[in-house]
Amino acid sequence: MRHKSIWLSAIIFLATGSPAQSQKPKKIYRVGYISTRNEIGRNEDAFRKRLHELGYVEGQDTVIEWKFASGKNSRFPDSAAELVRLNADAIVVQGVGATQAAKRASSTIPVVMANADDDPVRLGLIASLARPGGNVTGFVSISAELAGKRLEILKETVPRATRVAILSRSASTVAASHV
């Protein structure tokens, strides 16, 4: 009886394959990263660290395609187009110029703004901060929609304040949108 059991187990194993063979290979995520910098720096290291904390390991289940513009915004469109050709699962961008290039390159690949430095609503990159719509999302450091909220927080923090001054570069379109 024991002999039949061993043969039956062997037949089932051979017919169905080993568990290792039947498992689907783990997906390898391709993440594009467009930066104004010329090499991996503090922001990029923080990005890698956070991916690792979330369980993604570069070289195992995640490939990061680094695209550095070396301060030349004219490189953004080519970098974004290349990431689309590489079938990136998502594109992380720094700044508005890179966001615009990535949005123009694809309307389906998620584009994550990392610290956009201008108002993405005013520029037409997203519909609103609350509901960005489309394939662009992320966070911004400056937005006209936040100016009123910042003033409200200031009033709560310093209720006796009667005057507030804003210092900015006069040529800045960001500063102009806050006034």
Image: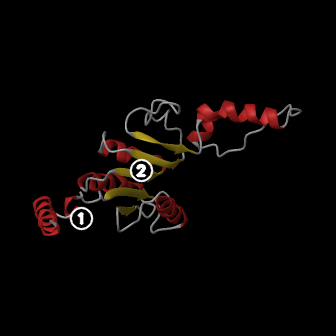
Provide the secondary structure element on which disc 2 rests.
helix
Q: Amino acid at mark 2?
A: Ala
Residue 10, horizontal then vertical, whole percent: 13, 66
| Image point (43%, 48%), residue name | 97
Give the residue at mark 2: 98
Residue depicted at 86% across the width and 31% down the height? 162
Q: How many marks?
A: 2
Q: Nearer the viewer, residue 16 or 139?
A: 16
Q: Quadrant of residue 24?
A: bottom left
| Residue 157 picture quarter | top right
Residue at image coords 68%, 30%: 148
The answer to whether residue 153 is above or below residue 172 is: above
- Mark 1 lies on a secondary structure that is helix
As drawn, is 23 to the left or to the right of 95?
Answer: left
Spatial CA span between label 2 and label 1 = 42 Å
Return the mark for residue 20: 1
Q: Position of residue 43 (x, y in %)?
A: 53, 61
Q: Residues within 10 Å of mark 2 (few under 14, many from 20)?
A: many
| Location of the N terminus (image quadrant) | bottom left
**Quarter of the rendering containing residue 76:** bottom left
Q: Work out which residue is located at the far right of the displayed protein and give it.
A: 160
The answer to whether residue 29 is left or right of residue 50 is left
The C terminus appears in which quarter of the rendering? top right
Percent x, y of residue 87: 26, 53
Q: Position of residue 12 (x, y in %)?
A: 13, 60
Q: Is residue 31 above or below residue 10?
A: above
Horizontal side, residue 44 vs residue 178: left or right: left
Q: Which mark is residue 73?
A: none
The first of marks 2 and 1 along the sequence is: 1
